[in-house]
Amino acid sequence: MSETALLRNAAEAGISVDLIDQLPTGLAVLAADGQWLRANTALGALCAVDPDALTGRAAHHTHLPALAARIDDALARFPDADAALRDVVVADDRAGRHLRLSLQPLADGTALLQLHDDSALKALEAQQETLAFGISHELRAPVRAIEQFARRLLAQDGAGDPQTTRDHLQRIQQASGHAGGLIDALLETMRASRPPRGATAVDISLLGDWICAELQDAEPGRTAEIDIAPDLWAWGDEHALKQMLGKLMHNAWKFSAQRDAVCITLEGERVGNRLQLRLRDAGRGFDMRYAERLFVPFRRLHSADDGAGHGLGLAIAQQLARAQGGHIRVESEPDAGTTFFIELPAVPDEDAAAP
């Protein structure tokens, strides 16, 4: 018997809410006037409230506002089966979730609302598409270059000009390095959305100093003006947060190449139970009309000559932020710099880690 049929039979038979609470799908029983009569634990978790707080009112007006009118219309037309809502997508872009809603009439005049979280499935599908595109398109170019210049070397049969030979070998080396970097980035992409390891208090200020020191060690000849605010604490997986912050800071460093000095500022504050960070640079920036491309794999805003890489770094950073329960957005202006706004869970009060 399917889960939907089991739920219908259980609701119509008046089986205890305890059974419904054991199911992973978000469930609620609605009266004909829209009032929520029951809501299970899974639905409370999806709405980020205690399930009891959803009952006794038309909670879809507050927690599902984009579909509230459709739900009210369906309830008014029940028990007409054609009025049922089936697999309607619920937009939840900010949190990066993919939710799907169904609403069906029950024999006693109430209705069963189901809210499915398809986020894990969608994330897996997106990973598969990214991997397939990376292999079939992005990786093909350096492999073709390696094959082409290796063929030319073989054609020389040891009698070629030494300078030409060195040039061919250098191109093979460059293409190999590009292919290796792309493979590493694809592996990072696949791992980025994995559930995080155990959360702890993480000193974001320390991570920022650490990452900037690594960037300066890699290019000691560049002048850098770095300002990292102290006492910025987040709650999450330290390794993942360092990886996320590293992608953003490396982006700031890379696109400041044409400046006399690299200027990076990291500041923020706690707002409620969230840490809100601002990472600013004075680099080349970009036109905000193209901002939606920034976190999409392989969608580059700049050319390779301008410092653009494989086009996965910021997509990985967003995946890492979302896996930690956070989010990244961006504001920029051409030739004036870019600001990344990073929202992360703050350290719970009882676990606050003072330095």
Image (cartoon, rainbow, N blue to C red):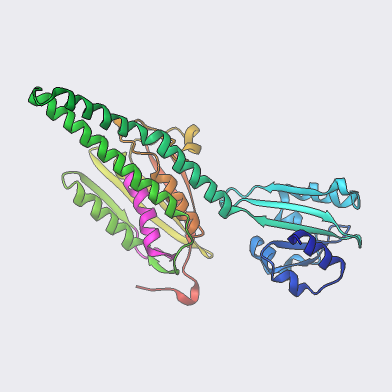
**Image point 90% across, 52% down: which residue?**
78
How many numbered callouts?
0
In the rendered image, is residue 279 in sight?
A: no
From the viewer's perspective, tell me whether residue 116 is left or right of residue 298: right
Which region shows up in magenta?
229-252
Please provide percent x and percent y for residue 191: 43, 54
Answer whether residue 339 is magenta in the image: no
Q: Quadrant of residue 339?
A: top left
Closest to the observer, 44 or 19 = 19
Answer whether residue 232 is magenta in the image: yes
Quadrant showing the N terminus = bottom right
Q: Quadrant of residue 177?
A: top left
Please provide percent x and percent y for residue 312: 40, 43
In the rendered image, is residue 332 in sight?
A: yes
Q: Going by the picture, which residue comes out furthest to the bottom?
A: 350
* Vertical side of 248 occupied by 107: above or below: below
**Image point 70% across, 62% down: which residue?**
26
Q: Quadrant of residue 206?
A: bottom left
Please provide percent x and percent y for residue 248: 37, 48
Quadrant showing the C terminus = bottom left
By secondary structure, the bulk of the magenta-drawn segment is best described as helix
* Vertical side of 203 occupied by 143: above or below: above
**Image point 41% across, 45% down: which residue?**
314
Please provide percent x and percent y for residue 120: 56, 55
From the viewer's perspective, tell me whether residue 211 is left or right of residue 25: left
Closest to the observer, 234 or 122 = 122
From the viewer's perspective, tell me whether residue 346 is left or right of residue 66: left
